[in-house]
Image (tube, grey):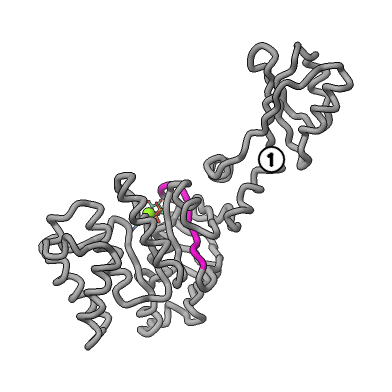
Amino acid sequence: MSVSVRGVSKLYGDQKALDNISFEVKSGEIVGFLGPNGAGKSTMMKIITGFMPPSSGKVFVNGCDIGDDNIEVRKRIGYLPENNPLYPDMFIREYLSFVASVYKLGNEQGKAIDEIIEVTGLIPEQNKKIGALSKGFRQRVGLAQALIHNPDVLILDEATSGLDPNQIVEIRNLIKEAGRKKTVLFSTHIMQEVEAICDRIIIIDHGIIKADEEKNNIYSRLHGTVQIITVEFDRQPDETNLRSIPDVTGVLHLKDNLWQIESAGKNDIRSQIFSYAVTNKLTVLSLQKKENNLEEVFRHLTN
Ligand code: ADP
Ligand code: MG
C-alpha cells in the first residue's frame, strides 16, 4: 500500500506548521522522516493517519482519500503516536484486547494478541500492568498496538525516543523486521536512526521539505556544495599559489605542513592537488577527503 501526500498545509491559528507538502511513500518502502523539533513531523503524521484534517491538500492511502473517513483504509494503517500514550492501569493483554476489539478482529483476536506479544518480545512481561513496565517495554506495547491488526502501512512517530542504546537497537530491529512486508514512515530527529533503518529519507524543516532522496543519494546533496581535503606536503607550499588551484574556494593552514583545502566545484579536486604538487616540486605525504555524513547534510539543509 502506498501513501501519497499532495499539497498539504496545516495552520495552527496563524502559524503555518506545514507548507504545501507533497511526497510519496511507495508500497514496501521504509522512509525516514527527519527533521529538527518543531519541523512538523508529528503534525504530518496525524494528518496521514486521519487523526487531524489538513488545512488544505490531501492524503491518499492506497489511492483512497484519508479525509473521506474510509474505515476500511484506516484499518490498514498502524500508528504509534509520539510519546506513546497508553493506559497505565491496564494489563498488557487487557489493553491489547481493547485495541483488537476496536479493529473488530473477532475470532482472530486471541490468536492476534498471542502472536503480537511474541513478535514484540513482550512474553516475559505479559502479565504486568502497563504502568509497571520500563520505557523500553512500554514502547513494545506501543508497537504491539500499532501492529496487532497486521496493517499494510505503519506510521511511527519517534518510536525510539527516550530509550537506552540497547533498547534502541531492539526496537529498530523490530521495525526493520515489521517493515519487510509493510510500507513504513518513520519520524526521528536522530540521523543515525534513518541511516540504520530507512531506504529513503525525507528531510523537513519549518514545514517545508528540504530533501527527498534515496539514502545513498542524499550525500550528494553536499557534493557540489563543499569538498574538504586535508593534505600533508613534505614542506611548506606557497599559500597564494595553493589558492590558485582551479575550483579551490578556501585554504586553511592546520599545522606544520598540513593544509585543509576546500572546493565548491563538482569535480574531485584531489587530482588537481597532485598536479599542483608535481608542478611545484612538492611531495604529497598524505591526502584525505572528508566524507560527508548525514549529520552534515542535515545541518546544511536545516540551518
Ligand atoms: P515535530 O513533530 O517535527 O517536532 P510538530 O508537528 O509537533 O513538529 O510541530 C510543528 C509546529 O507546530 C511547531 O511549531 C509546534 O509548536 C506547532 N504545533 C504543533 N501542535 C500544535 C497545536 N496543537 N497547536 C498549536 N501549535 C502546534
Ligand atoms: Mg513530533
The image quadrant where one finds the C terminus is: top right
Q: How many marks?
A: 1
Q: Decide if residue 101 is in sight here.
A: no
Q: Residues within 10 Å of mark 1 (few under 14, many from 20)?
A: few
Q: Is residue 51 above or below residue 88?
A: below
Left or right of residue 232: residue 151 = left
Which residue is found at the position 43% from the left and 69% from the top? 48
User: In the image, is 231 to the left or to the right of 195?
Assistant: right
* Label 1 within 8 A of ligand 1 by Cβ: no
Q: Is residue 279 above or below residue 29?
A: above
Residue at the limit of the structure toward the right, as seen here:
279
- Measured from the top left, where is residue 216 in percent x and y? 61, 53
| View extreme (bottom): residue | 107
Q: Which residue is mark 1?
A: 225
Q: In the image, ligand 1 is in what quadrant?
A: bottom left
Residue 211 on the magenta segment:
no
36 in the magenta segment: yes
Task: Return the residue nearer the eye: 229 or 121.
Answer: 121
Q: Secondary structure at mark 1?
A: loop
In magenta, the rendered stretch is 29-37
Is 213 left or right of 29, judged from the image as shown?
Answer: right
Q: What is the x, y in percent for residue 168?
A: 34, 50
Residue 93, percent from left and from top: 16, 70
Q: Locate residue 46: give its quadrant.
A: bottom left
For the question of whether residue 192 can be seen, the reply is: yes
Q: Amino acid at mark 1?
A: Thr
Q: Residue at x 12, y 66 (%)?
A: 91
Q: Horizontally, is 4 left or right of 101 in the view?
A: right
Residue drawn where x is 70% and y is 27% of the image: 287
